[in-house]
């Protein structure tokens, strides 16, 4: 962690530009960024769209009388929504004033803020406060922080139009009071190392710049006691991993990102000496980029409590892309803005719109990459393997990351897969219908606990039909997986991770290999080894997204009625369609997703059985989506290995009415365990066999050997691929 | 039916241009249509794409030795596929020769045809013949006809490059022999009024033009006996309804269309006096346009045995659009070609590509329209109600058409609905995985009979859990519905139809109204009245496409296991999720589809119950898609009325995280039966009530009255909408 020695209050003050001290000019946006915009004949399309949208919103607000109600309602209620509308209108009015020069916008902001100046000093704790830290305008102080972040940006844009008296009234009665309340008035919350505290820090710090108040800036950066143990800099140092990964997962990373980048942008403008963008090897820029990397076709990988329909088309990312572009001029951000079809009305957003319109965009470099978790990078990782850069590439995500706090799922060493633009091996995400009243008011549903978080709802090992950490997330926080190996460079890509402590006495290790072979997208080889201290039942579910085309095993369907798989831990939500038994050569399941076929070939432990099921049981309110699942079950073993191969193949073309290779192009899969590693041989229908060798040891210099079909295979290092030998 | 008196052989001969008689110049395509194409610097994109595609295909064929195997295999086998490849290559080579002037293409066609000239005369009936009329090159003569249609077009393009000797050899040993075989050699098939016979007629007739043989032309147009009872003209007169609708439904209309338009195009070029495009008030052009009208976002309405993924992107429609544009120069065809992204390499296709590139396309006029069924237009109809022209319009299709032969479904007065680009009320289409080997070789699955065709799999009345016509399609052919009323002009659109004979002693009548009210898309009011001669159980299923958001009735879920609904007629394929009971005010079910909410509000007969289920039971091979269904069940009634209202409302925006109006905007639905009609009152949450009045009588001049809530409502004609009265 980088922490320069000389973080003193005096040093902080010294970095604030003296020239600004007596001016009221904007400090959060650079008015010169609008040069050439006002009155120009042709505007970049992205700007025009944004301008129309914000103008419509602000004009509508200005057409009704100022409404600054006494706070009363909790989230969703009238006063709550009205104060949200007010900060949105205030922020918009400030930007529109800068863009158009229309005094009406500045005057609207003035009148609105004077109304707040009358109300705010009269307020105590919000009457609808609950368990969360209470706000004054809102039931929780988080919303007050958000008000301040937007409000102070709107104020900054018009502050120089005010009379000295009005400016003093608003400075003192609104912003200074809010900043005091949210910092020293709410010190416990403010001094947390948590993304909610980042909103407070951003609001307080930006208020410090606007009010030319070094004390507020110092608190925001280093905590109320200015020791540096709390505050924004500590948050930057501790809330992201060295790779810019945020532990709650991509969906929440998107949400957490906004106050970081907005405040960093303000710091960079007002205290460039702090080199905030360079801090921790540029971790904030890494965080912007990793947020984008953790998407497929623009949609966030739906890990942990995530809404699967959440994409980069979201306010947080319009801001982050504009600010990231301002900080770097990296033209690959422009292609993201193009996909978003949106930007911001800030000078940064205008630069994005202008440079995009002039053809400067370059493709964003989606890549195979390891995202370590934990502030020290030692709490596991998210391993992303991509067969290419485009939307149709095969993308494998190995979720070897830490618990990720209360929104984390019990899914150590889980994985998901996309191919040809579609989810193939899926994650349920969260059980929630955002903002839909009849679905528990849009909150997380109880099925989020009973299904979506449970291990059986994921693609990883379940022991004795219970979830990892017995479903207790605080226990999960104590046990992160270890990412043992990652290779994302060559055509064959590999991730190996190990989990200890998800169950007492049980260790499991998983190697996932993206393995190009034959004509289709890469095959995925999955070797999961579990060692336990006593015999147990091991379930390995695969949540596949597609329609079954063929079953290569003897299946007994449930014809008369469809039973429930089990009593608890998510099993109560699975309807059983059929059970199956395996021959010596394992089993296959083939499905079609969109226009391509996928065959999943299984070599579970001897005696294992198969279960074909679907989510949706014990769901009287139809809260769950119905999605198919295949479970390999091995009972009565202490140690076991599951070897599975997922093979994309063929093509279905409904327009041309042609179908190619709807059947697996693999003839056989064979696995042997050697003394210190595993060999898996894949024999295609056409062409030479491939042998994959996986050593237990990670040492790149160590040599290994094992025998398969009478041939001795020798390799060096953790992983090797041997083509065309040992037929 | 238009049938000019003077259809004599002499008259036919007289219409063939004498000037052509001794020439060998192309008669099926106009070589001048390629003027400006050869060697031009810039080509229209659609042409370039097509040219590359065909050139790759033909060049690949030319790179291997000529292969004209002795016929042996059935469909899918080697000799079958090779003869298909040959006609495709022959047709492509002819077009490429005309476009490029490369003698190699003409020479390849010559060598290929000389090989056929050696083989063909030696052939008897195909060794793999089955129940269908046997071909010589193929197991069924239909494929031989298709060979001839493509082959003779390829031959026509290069025939003038041949020596007199080669030309005579190919004329006599290939084409004349084929045409003889497919006409007089196969008279029973040739003289049918059936779309398979249209392929034969097209092949024989086009051969007649190319070989300058009026006898072949006459047979093709008027049947082997030239009486006019059979042949192409009789097919044109009898196989389409006056509105250009083909009785098997949109999916098969697409398939049937091709030989009609290809041959009509040849007739128009060679015997313009026949005015083939004007025949029956332009029925063939109507057929092209109606094929396009019967789509949603380019995908065919999936009625009867249809694949739901079949769109206008299909060879038949590339041909039909090019030929239709050549015949009419209607610029709205160009927008269809644009959507297709394909055209043909014929001069007509080049005109499409060129005019599209020069910006002449106009939107295709998708409209509310009635498509009568039956050659006389008296066998029911397909009623299409569209709220607008665009892809997002609400489209209601009332399937009041006839049985449609063996691919028809038992779904009299069925309906489907699209809104905002999505299916909302759906039709299963056919149970089939086209060309997928493991799914019964890609043929119709047995679940096509046991589920997809059955009445319960549709959105219409089921009596005593049996299907219409007891599931016998030949009985269905005897009983078409009657379309009693259609109004597609105003904002409120109406279809009323009646079915007699689907069940002994049972008549049912259905009015579907597209009713704009409030902010969302139009509501759909559904009044279904049934009168029977004895008490029965009436089921009214609704196959909705979406996720349940709210249930406005008391539901009892099946928690422990999920039972099957019934033993047969499709009921064996439904899993029961829950059953429900209704209050006096009926019941509601709200679901979300994509970004919009839909509430289905039911007023079934008193004592009715509800069943929530899903398809997929008794399906051991996972042949069925799992789709939800809601069934209203009224038991023990002879006469009954089901009043239902489907209401699109609100919006869900995952990007902005906003949800609007997720709850129904209707407060109450009320229905009364008067002495000679029905009144339904819809009371919105905001705004005035609307009363819909539906008289039993269709007479537009007749007056009616009925009383609702103490108010007397008077109206004239079958249907009236009364806004803002009788609160």
Image (cartoon, coloured by chain):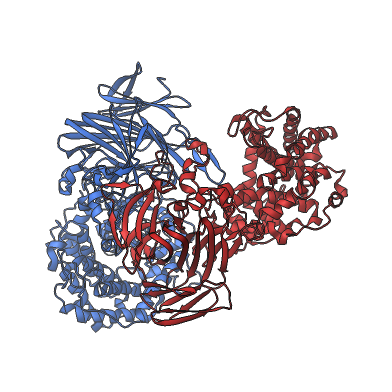
Chain colours: A red, B blue
Quadrant assignment for the C terminus of chain B: top left
Q: Quadrant of residue A716?
A: bottom right
Where B660 falls versus A39 (above or below)? Answer: above
Question: Where's residue A539, x and y in %?
Answer: 41, 57
Q: Is residue B421 left or right of residue A167?
A: left
- Could you tell me residue B458's position as x and y percent? 28, 44
Residue sticking out furthest to the front: A534
Q: In the rendered view, does A247 fall on the left or right side of A537? A: right
The x, y position of residue B528, in whole percent, is 28, 33
Task: Say whether residue B257 is visible.
Answer: no
The vertical placement of B33 against A571, above or below, is below
Viewer-proximal residue among A68 and B529:
A68
Residue B637 x, y percent position in the rendering? 21, 29
* Residue B273 appears in the rendering: yes
Number of numbered discs visible in the structure rendering: 0
Left or right of A489 in this view: A589: left
Which residue is at the front of the view, A443 or A595? A443
Outermost residue, top side: B710
Instruction: Name the residue nearer the viewer: B649 or A14.
Output: A14
Of B35 and A225, nearer the camera is: A225
Q: Residue at x 25, y 79 (%)?
A: B68
- Which image quadrant for residue B221? bottom left
């Amino acid at each position: 962690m980088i922490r320069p020695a000389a973080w003193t209050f005096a040093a902080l003050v010294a970095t604030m530009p003296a020239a600004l001290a007596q001016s009221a000019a904007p400090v959060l946006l650079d008015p010169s960024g609008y040069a050439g915009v006002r009155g120009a004949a042709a505007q970049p399309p992205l700007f025009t769209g944004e301008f129309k949208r914000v103008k419509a919103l602000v004009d509508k607000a200005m057409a009704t009388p100022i409404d600054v109600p006494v706070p009363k309602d909790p989230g969703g209620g009238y006063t709550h929504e009205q104060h949200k509308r007010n900060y949105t209108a205030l922020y918009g009015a400030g930007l529109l004033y800068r863009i158009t020069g229309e005094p009406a916008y500045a005057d609207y902001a003035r009148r609105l803020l004077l109304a707040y100046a009358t109300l705010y000093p009269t307020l105590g704790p919000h009457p609808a406060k609950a368990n969360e830290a209470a706000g004054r305008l809102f039931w929780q102080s988080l919303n007050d922080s958000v008000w301040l972040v937007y409000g102070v940006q709107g104020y900054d844009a018009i502050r120089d139009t005010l009379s000295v008296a009005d400016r003093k009234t608003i400075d003192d009665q609104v912003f200074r009071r809010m900043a005091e309340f949210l910092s020293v008035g709410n010190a416990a919350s403010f001094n947390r190392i948590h993304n909610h505290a980042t909103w407070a820090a951003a609001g307080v710090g930006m208020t410090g710049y606007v009010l030319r108040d070094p004390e507020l800036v110092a608190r925001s950066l280093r905590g109320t006691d200015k020791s540096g143990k709390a505050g924004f800099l500590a948050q930057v140092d501790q809330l992201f991993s060295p790779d810019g990964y945020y532990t709650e997962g991509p969906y929440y990373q998107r949400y957490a990102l906004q106050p970081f980048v907005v405040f960093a942008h303000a710091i960079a403008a007002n205290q460039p000496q702090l080199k905030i963008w360079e801090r921790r090897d540029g971790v904030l820029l890494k965080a912007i980029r990793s947020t984008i990397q953790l998407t497929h076709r623009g949609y966030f990988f739906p890990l942990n409590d995530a809404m699967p329909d959440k994409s980069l088309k979201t306010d947080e990312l319009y801001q982050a892309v504009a600010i990231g572009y301002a900080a770097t001029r990296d033209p690959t951000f422009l292609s993201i803005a193009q996909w978003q079809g949106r930007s911001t009305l800030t000078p940064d957003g205008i630069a994005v719109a202008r440079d995009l319109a002039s053809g400067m965009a370059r493709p964003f470099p989606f890549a195979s990459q390891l995202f370590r978790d934990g502030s020290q990078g030692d709490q596991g990782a998210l391993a992303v393997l991509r067969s290419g850069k485009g939307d149709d590439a095969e993308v494998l995500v190995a979720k070897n990351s830490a618990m990720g706090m209360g929104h984390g799922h019990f899914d150590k060493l889980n994985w998901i897969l996309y191919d040809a633009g579609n989810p193939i091996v899926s994650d349920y995400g969260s059980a929630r219908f955002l903002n839909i009243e009849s679905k528990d008011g849009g909150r997380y549903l109880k099925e989020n606990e009973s299904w979506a978080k449970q291990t059986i709802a994921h693609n990883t090992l379940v022991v004795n039909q219970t979830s990892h950490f017995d479903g207790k997330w605080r226990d999960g926080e104590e046990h992160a997986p270890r990412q043992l190996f990652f290779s994302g460079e060559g055509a064959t890509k590999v991730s190996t991770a190990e989990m200890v402590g998800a169950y007492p006495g049980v260790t499991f290790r998983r190697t996932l290999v993206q393995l190009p072979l034959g004509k289709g997208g890469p095959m995925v080889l999955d070797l999961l080894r579990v060692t336990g201290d006593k015999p147990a039942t091991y379930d390995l579910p695969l949540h596949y997204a597609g329609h079954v085309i063929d079953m290569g095993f003897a299946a007994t369907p449930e014809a008369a009625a469809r039973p429930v798989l089990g009593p608890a831990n998510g099993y109560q939500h699975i309807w059983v369609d059929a059970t199956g038994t395996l021959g010596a050569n394992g089993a296959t399941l083939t499905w079609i997703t969109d226009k391509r076929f996928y065959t999943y070939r299984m070599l579970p432990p001897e005696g294992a059985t198969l279960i074909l099921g679907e989510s949706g049981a014990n769901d009287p309110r139809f809260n769950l989506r119905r999605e198919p699942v295949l479970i390999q079950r091995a009972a009565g073993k202490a140690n076991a290995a599951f070897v599975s191969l997922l093979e994309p193949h063929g093509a279905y073309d409904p327009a041309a009415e042609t179908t190619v290779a709807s059947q697996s192009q693999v003839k056989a899969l064979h696995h042997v365990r050697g003394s210190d590693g595993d060999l898996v041989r894949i024999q295609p229908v056409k062409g030479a066999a491939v042998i994959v060798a996986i050593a237990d040891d990670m040492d790149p210099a160590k040599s290994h050997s094992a025998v398969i079909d009478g041939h001795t295979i020798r390799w060096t290092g953790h992983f090797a691929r041997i083509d065309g030998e040992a037929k």
